[in-house]
Structures are given as C-alpha cells and as structure tokens.
Amino acid sequence: MWIRLLLVFGMLSMTGCLFTVDSDTHTSSASWSQAEVSRIQRGQTSASWVRSNFGEPGRRTQFEDGSQLWHYSNRSEVETELGLFLLFHIDVEKTKESQLSIEITDNVVTDYWIEDSRF
C-alpha cells in the first residue's frame, strides 16, 4: 500500500518538470506568403500577375498540351530547446518546406495547391 502511494506521489511530482526553455523559427528562404496565394483566382489570374508578385519560379514543368506548372518553395526551421528537471537540455530542430505549384494554361492560372513536407 505504501509503495503504491509513493509511486503515485513520485509520478505526480514529475508531471511539471518538462518545460520549454526557448523556441525560435527561422525562415531560410521564402518566395511566397499565404496572403499572396489567397489573391490567386482560378480562371482569372494571369501568368504575368503571378510572375510580378512571386517572381520567376524555382522550377517549371512543361506539358505537351502547352500547359505549365510553376513551382515555388518556402523553407523554415524551428529550433526548440527543452529542459528536464533543470538538469538536462535537449535541442530539437525541425525543418518545414512548403511547395506552391501553380498550373498555367494559355497564360491563365487554372489550378494551384500547396504541399507541406516536414523533416
């Protein structure tokens, strides 16, 4: 009985010992923002508007029917330092890459989408 009580007390006393010391987000490269993407309208936005607001795409894919995919990338890194019992510190780094793909047919945006990758 006393052993169980001691175990429960020990587990409860450890619940608040993991804490975040510091967390930073660094954008290493960005060619678009969500606000800019929300202004794109399928069937209405021109390729010249995309080029003037997003710049030249990082990569293009040309199809036989004349349509193109323009690819833009954003990359950010999140660094978090965790402390445990005020004795140990652990650094956790995560990288997030977002890929914006814009399909253009006859100089008009026909579709676009965003894909996220985390590693």
Image (cartoon, helix red, strand yellow):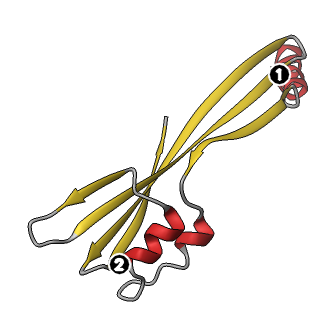
Q: Which residue is mark 1?
A: 83
Residue 10 vs residue 82, the one in the foreground: 82
Q: Residue 118: x and y, percent?
A: 50, 41
Which residue is at the far left? 64
Horizontally, is 98 left or right of 6 in the view? left
Q: Amino acid at mark 1?
A: Gly
Q: Which mark is residue 109?
A: 2
What's the distance in space between the residues labelled 2 and 1, CA to CA? 48 Å
Q: Residue 27: x and y, percent?
A: 65, 43
The N terminus: image quadrant: top right
Helix, strand or loop at mark 1: strand
Horizontally, is 14 left or right of 67 in the view? right
Mark 2 and mark 1 lie on one chain; the one further toward the N terminus is 1
Q: Quadrant of residue 32?
A: bottom right
Relative to 94, does residue 112 appear above or below in the rendering?
A: below
Relative to 110, does residue 16 appear above or below in the rendering?
A: above
Relative to 3, does residue 52 appear above or below in the rendering?
A: below
Q: Amino acid at mark 2?
A: Val
Which residue is at the far bottom? 44
Q: Quadrant of residue 89?
A: top right
Q: Quadrant of residue 63?
A: bottom left
Helix, strand or loop at mark 2: strand
